[in-house]
Image (cartoon, helix red, strand yellow):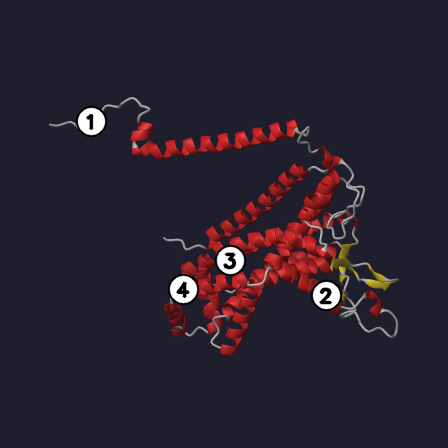
Amino acid sequence: MTTLSDPPSQSFQFSKLINDTRYRSYTFQFIALLCVIALMSYLGWNLVQNLRAAGLNISYGFLGSPAGYDINQRLIEYDSQSTHWRAAMVGVLNTLLVAFLGCITATVIGVFVGVLRLSKNWLVRKIMSLYVEIFRNVPVLIWILVIMAIFIAVLPQPRDFRGDDATASMLGGLFAFTGRGFYLPRPYFTAEWAAGGAGWLVVIGVLIASFFGSRKLSAWASKTQEATGVRPTTWYLTLGIWFVPLLIVLLAQGLHWEIPALAGFNFQGGIFARNSLIALWFALSIYTAAFIAENVRAGILAISKGQTEAAASLGLRPNRIMNLVILPQALRVIIPPLISQYLNLTKNSSLAIAVGYMDLTGTLGGITLNQTGRAIECVLLLMLFYLTISLAISAIMNAYNNAVKLKER
């Protein structure tokens, strides 16, 4: 009878780090990491030595000093006596506002144009192709300046809304679109417990809870469909989850609207969105949408034509085929380049200074840098902020990409 036993264990030898294929890749990666650390350390040391030789030192104490300048568009309280750090935060929020609005608008327009580029209607297909070729082949800075110039030249001034001989009127008595900017109704709460911004935190919390509630409902519907073969109707429940709690909270907090009204030489009250913000938002959206449209078209063409024919043989209409069969499969092709377009839009928002919109580049990388002379500190902070924003967008979109990708059983 023969007994099989494990081979005798051998002591670890450093030669295995090179000769053994199990460890060789880790060895090279570790060596590369050490080289990168050494290179970055040398560059940092060289920077410090050069600054010391020039009598300079890296310090961020200037962030606590009064900024001394005004910002025309802001989401938080700010005045000229606020600190440079506060001014930088205003710039960050302005950048995030343009990036958020631009990504949503560009996605909607891009998907719409991308689908219509494959339309069977010759005229529609050519018009969408013309849109793509025009907007993606002209620099975005030119579009920003062109749209800003159109707003200033075409839209009426506040004085045109005054008196019986007014040449312009407010849309529905609620909105005023002028050459200075757009005036919109502002919601506010009257309940004492909802004052000081707490009411909006409650609203955001309700929306987040509604999001997870709708996800749970969708998961339950999918599970029921897998078990019975029939998907239950849930659209009215989804609407109830989103709107009923929100409506209850808004009524409980006493939601009211402040309507802008002409007083003197300008409108007072409501929300004021400067034309620089609208022009930047619109230009970035239509420019990026041209690239997204091509991504959508490529994703749709990547799906086999047999998928469309099979869905049509089941009696599905073309719009249902696109929504239920083609686009869900095309997402795995569309989303990776879509992430790059979102990042490009966010970074292109740094062109806002061309139309006077004070984003992060205009505050921290512009006025603050010029006033304090702290170029290295401001540029490093600017790079850190944009890197953080870009990584956050990438993380969110990659998580969504993992959620929609094809999963094998």
Kindly report the distance in space between the C-alpha atoms of the residues bearing marks 4 and 2: 42 Å
User: Does residue 16 show up?
Assistant: yes
Kindly report the distance in space between the C-alpha atoms of the residues bearing marks 3 and 4: 25 Å
The amino acid type of the residue labelled 2 equals: Phe
* Vertical arrangement, residue 165 with respect to residue 337, above or below: below
The amino acid type of the residue labelled 3 equals: Ser
The amino acid type of the residue labelled 4 equals: Ile
**Tag 2: Cα neighbours inside 10 Å, few (<14), some, or many (≥20)?**
many
Identify the disc placed on residue 303: 4
Q: Earlier in the sequence, mark 1 or mark 2?
A: 1
Q: Earlier in the sequence, mark 1 or mark 3?
A: 1
Give percent across and percent down for residue 310. Answer: 37, 70
Mark 4 vs mark 2: give the one in front. Answer: 2
Give percent across and percent down for residue 101. Answer: 63, 57
User: Does residue 107 show up?
Assistant: no
Q: Residue furthest top?
A: 11
**Tag 4: Cα neighbours inside 10 Å, few (<14), some, or many (≥20)?**
some
* Vertical arrangement, residue 6 with respect to residue 155, above or below: above
Which residue carries the number 1 mark? 5
Of residues 269 and 317, the one nearer the viewer is 269
